[in-house]
Structure formats: C-alpha cells, structure tokens
Image (spheres, grey):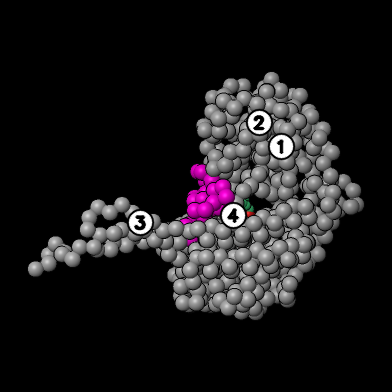
C-alpha cells in the first residue's frame, strides 16, 4: 500500500509539510503509522494542481460514458484489493472485520453505481416560450473538497469521491486524523486508475491533517468550488459559516440522536434484534445509531428486560475476530469521552440496566473497549437523551399515545433517522410521515442503498448524497437559449 508517511498532493506522493502526527491502534494503543499532515501550502498546491487537471481537455472534454471508465476501473481495483483494504481499516478504526468487509464492498458498489449513472446522465431540453430552443446543462464545478470522519472511512470517502469524479471534477479529500490510512490506500487506487487511463494525475489529492488546519484551508481556498462534509454538527456549522463568506455550496452530513420506536404489536424477535443492531453495531459509532428507544408503556418492562439479557450476551472482542459483534471504539480518548457522558447521566439520575463501564478482564485491558450500555429512568430532555454520544449507549423511554410519541421523537435538534417496529402498516405510515428524519426504516434498521438519497433534516445536515441525482450535487447548472429566429427585437 506504499510508504505510510506519504500523502497525495495534486497527483504527487510525498511527505506533507505540516506537523507530524500518529495514528494508533484502538486494539493495543500502539502507533500504526506516523505521518506528516498537510499544511495550508500543501492544500494550495493540491487545489492548483486539481484546477489545472480539471481544466485539462483530456478530462474536461471526456464524454460522460468515457468518464465512467475511470470509476469502473477504481471499482475493479477496490475489488481486487478488498481484503487488504478491509484489514487496513480494521487495524486503523478497530471495527470488526465483517463490518469493514461490508464497507469495502459498499465503496466498490458506490463507484460502480456512479459509473452506471454516468452512462445515462442527461441534460434537458426545457419547453420553449419564444423563438429559441432552451437547454439546461450541468457542468463540472472544478475542484471539490471532501472532508470525512473516522467512523466508516472508505464508505464515506467513496460516497464523495465517486460522484465528484463522475461530475467531472478534481477532488481534494481530507480524511480524519484518527483514521487516515484507508483514504490514502483509496488515493493510491484512484491514482493507479488515472494512470491506467492516461488521465491527469492532479485530479486526486488525499490530504490528512488536523481539521482546523488542513480542513479549513480546503474550505477557505478560493479555488475550491464546493465542499462536501461529513462529521459533527459543530464542525458542520463552522464549515457552513466559512462557506457562506465565499458564497460556496456545501453539503453537510452531520450528527443524530435517532429514535427507534417499538409498538406493542411489533414482531418481538425482529424488534429485539433490530434495536440491538441499530445501536450496538459499529460499537454505536454511527451517525444513524438508534440511540433513543421509545417503548410503548404496555411492553416497556418485558421488552427492556429481554433486551438487557440479550445485550449481555453480545460477543465483545478484537475487530479481526470474525465472531466479534462489539469491537473496540476508534480511540481510547473517544472511549473515555463516552464514559464521562455515561457517568454524568448516572450522577443525574439515570439507571444503568447493563454496561456503563469498560469490560473486565486482561484481554480487554489494552483496547478501547466499552460495554454495550442501556440506561433508563431519565426524561427525554435529559442531556443523555439529547446529546450525540457516538458510542454503544442506548437510552430507553416509555410512551403512551401517538401524539406524545411523535412530540418526544421530534424534540431534538437532530433529524437524521428513525426506526419504527409495528405490524400495522397504517401506524407505520402515519408515524413515518410525522417524524422529522431524513431516513425512516420500518421493520428494519441501518440498511443502506446507494440508489436511495441520504441526508439529514434540522441540525443533522443540508443536502442529500447518493441516488442518481447525487452526481448533480457536484455540478453547476447552466441554461442556454439558442435563437432560432433571424430577426431580433431591435434589428433594423
Ligand atoms: P468531526 O466533525 O470532528 O470531524 C469530521 C472531519 O472534519 C474530520 O476529518 C476532521 O478532521 C474535520 N474537521 C474538524 N474540524 C474542522 C474544521 N474546523 N474545518 C474543516 N474540517 C474540520 O467529527 P468526528 O470525526 O468526531 O466524526 C463523528 C461525527 O460525524 C458525529 O457527529 C457523526 O454523527 C458524524 N457523522 C455523520 C454522518 C452522516 O452521514 N450524517 C456519517 C458519519 C458520521 P480531524 O479529525 O482530522 O481533525
């Protein structure tokens, strides 16, 4: 996968000129790699090279179906190196190997999907209202910045890089400092695909480095025409404010505090499994984690007791063991932050139904482990019910009638996702339409399809990713009026 202390600056692999930093194993705490991050000067070089590459006729004039070949080539290379990519991501993020294999497959699928979408990309002839033909065309933006978090690196990187390249742009990707390795590996793959097809190398840059330095330099750079960001709401607000100064479009995929609702008539087995998977898979480090469980009062005690019993049986272990269900968290510092939030909730009156601490035992001593945790006994306006924890922590809340439920579910600044478990399709439909969430799952949870738009409402974000129209988010629209009449109004 190349020398780890090299970043991709406008098509050239070299050491960054920013401060050095380490990425550490969540399993052992030992350093995995030391890198020199990207400095603002590196960002400037990458953006200039990107702008030149985007304007290069070899790329700019390439018809969409030929651009599609680049994405297909990237998909092929991701597939060829799938196991290495999954293992690298498990090493860097701590995630279970089953999950990282799925994320790599998702990244491959994303490149294939956008390649296929490119084959059928259309402009439109708009209805003419005079002696002219009117067309609406979409054109590349130029250089696009993509800033991604640490929780599902290769999938979130692909979700931005694929449609941005499909739109005919150059991409400057900034992965999170905690997990830079797989983005650099993806950079090598895109660079190889560009070389295979004789396309300009400057179309791809991968610039790890601290967000406030490398990330902000990308957002502020006058040569960057759009930023697509996934991360926390506070960072998203900052990026949105910087973008507003430049009048630059941004898409923001931000945090969540998603409700999962279980009605008394739900299929109990499915709901139990779905609620556990919704919060504890990815060790809860998921923007869409179903972190608030609303249980109808008539089933509250019985359902919660069984959920606690099953949660206690989840297999906790290292990410590289395929039997592991709950792997270490991404970093010891993040695990400690989660522990502080849970301790504060308990001090504020929350009852620990299970977990609430790191697991005992020498095999867990070095890793960033935290037990799957279920709390209850606090109202929906308690901080633990309102703040995104980004860890394996579920809070259970009772509800009685539907209006009360919808009011509680919506009483949060977030609006990312929602799960509904019921056998009554009318109840599901009514609640799905009333809940403020960008994605609603009915009798399932955390399923993803690249062909279905994804994004948040309220402080969970702005804009949508995925879907056929995902490419258009990385393009600029232009209208063309083509006169068909020889006589213009002021002609002599
Ligand atoms: P952060 O917002 O801290 O970081 C996300 C990315 O932004 C990182 O690459 C980070 O760099 C960078 N960054 C940080 N500060 C700035 C800045 N001032 N300017 C530009 N870039 C900056 O989020 P986390 O890494 O903690 O990720 C977890 C968050 O991501 C959660 O809130 C989660 O909900 C959200 N998320 C949302 C998803 C969605 O699709 N809605 C999906 C996945 C996660 P660095 O870390 O290197 O400093």
Q: Which mark is residue 421?
A: 2
Residue under pointer 3:
125
Q: Is mark 4 within 8 Å of ligand 1?
A: yes
In this picture, residue 122 sits left or right of residue 383: left
Residue under pointer 4:
231
Q: Is residue 378 visible?
A: no
Image position, residue 83 (x, y; %): 77, 62
Q: Secondary structure under badge 1?
A: helix
Taking the magenta stretch, the answer to whether it contains residue 53 is no
Q: Which residues are magenta?
A: 451-474
Q: Is mark 2 within 8 Å of ligand 1?
A: no
- Residue that sits furthest to the left in the current view: 492
Q: Secondary structure under badge 3?
A: strand
In this picture, residue 471 sits left or right of residue 486: right
Q: Secondary structure under badge 4?
A: loop
In this picture, residue 467 sits left or right of residue 84: left
* Real-space CA distance between mark 3 and mark 4, rounded to the nearest whole angstrom: 38 Å
């Amino acid at each position: 996968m190349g020398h780890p202390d090299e970043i991709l600056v406008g098509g050239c692999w070299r050491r960054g000129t920013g401060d050095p930093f380490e990425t550490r194993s969540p399993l052992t705490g030992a350093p995995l790699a030391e890198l020199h991050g990207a400095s603002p000067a590196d960002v400037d070089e990458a953006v200039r090279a990107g702008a030149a590459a985007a304007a290069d006729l070899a790329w700019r004039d390439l018809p969409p179906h030929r651009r599609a070949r680049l994405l297909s080539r990237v998909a092929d290379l991701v597939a060829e190196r799938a196991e290495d990519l999954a293992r690298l991501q498990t090493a860097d993020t701590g995630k279970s190997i089953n999950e990282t294999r799925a994320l790599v497959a998702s990244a491959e699928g994303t490149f294939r999907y956008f390649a296929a979408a490119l084959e059928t990309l259309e402009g439109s002839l708009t209805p003419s209202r005079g002696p002219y033909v009117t067309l609406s065309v979409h054109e590349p933006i130029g250089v696009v910045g993509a800033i991604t978090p640490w929780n599902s690196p290769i999938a979130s990187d692909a979700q931005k890089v694929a449609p941005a390249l499909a739109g005919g742009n150059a991409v400057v990707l900034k992965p999170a400092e905690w997990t830079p390795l797989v983005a650099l590996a993806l950079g090598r793959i895109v660079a190889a695909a560009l070389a295979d097809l004789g396309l300009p190398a400057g179309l791809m840059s991968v610039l790890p480095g601290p967000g406030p330095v490398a990330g902000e330099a990308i957002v502020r750079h006058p040569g960057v025409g759009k930023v697509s960001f996934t991360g926390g709401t506070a960072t998203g607000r900052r990026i949105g404010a910087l973008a507003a100064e430049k009048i630059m479009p941004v898409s923001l995929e931000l945090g969540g505090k998603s409700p999962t609702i279980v009605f008394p008539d739900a299929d109990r087995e499915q709901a139990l499994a779905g609620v556990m998977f919704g919060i504890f898979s990815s060790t809860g480090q998921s923007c869409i984690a179903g972190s608030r469980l609303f249980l109808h009062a008539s089933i509250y005690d019985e359902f919660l007791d069984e959920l606690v019993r099953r949660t206690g049986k989840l297999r906790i272990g290292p990410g590289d063991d395929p039997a592991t269900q709950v792997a270490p968290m991404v970093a010891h510092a993040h695990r400690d932050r989660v522990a502080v939030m849970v301790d504060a909730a308990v001090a504020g009156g929350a009852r620990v139904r299970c977990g609430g601490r790191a697991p005992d035992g020498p095999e867990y001593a070095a890793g960033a482990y935290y037990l799957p945790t279920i709390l209850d006994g606090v109202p929906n306006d308690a901080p633990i019910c309102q703040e995104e924890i980004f860890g394996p922590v579920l809070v259970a809340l009772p509800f009685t009638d539907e209006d009360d439920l919808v009011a509680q579910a919506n009483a949060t600044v977030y609006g990312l996702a929602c799960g509904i478990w019921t056998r009554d399709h009318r109840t599901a439909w009514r609640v799905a339409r009333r809940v403020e969430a960008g994605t609603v799952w009915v009798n399932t949870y955390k399923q993803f399809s690249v062909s279905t738009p994804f994004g948040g409402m309220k402080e969970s974000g702005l804009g949508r990713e995925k879907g056929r129209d995902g490419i258009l988010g990385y393009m600029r629209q232009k209208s063309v009026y083509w006169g068909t009449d020889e006589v213009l109004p002021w002609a002599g």
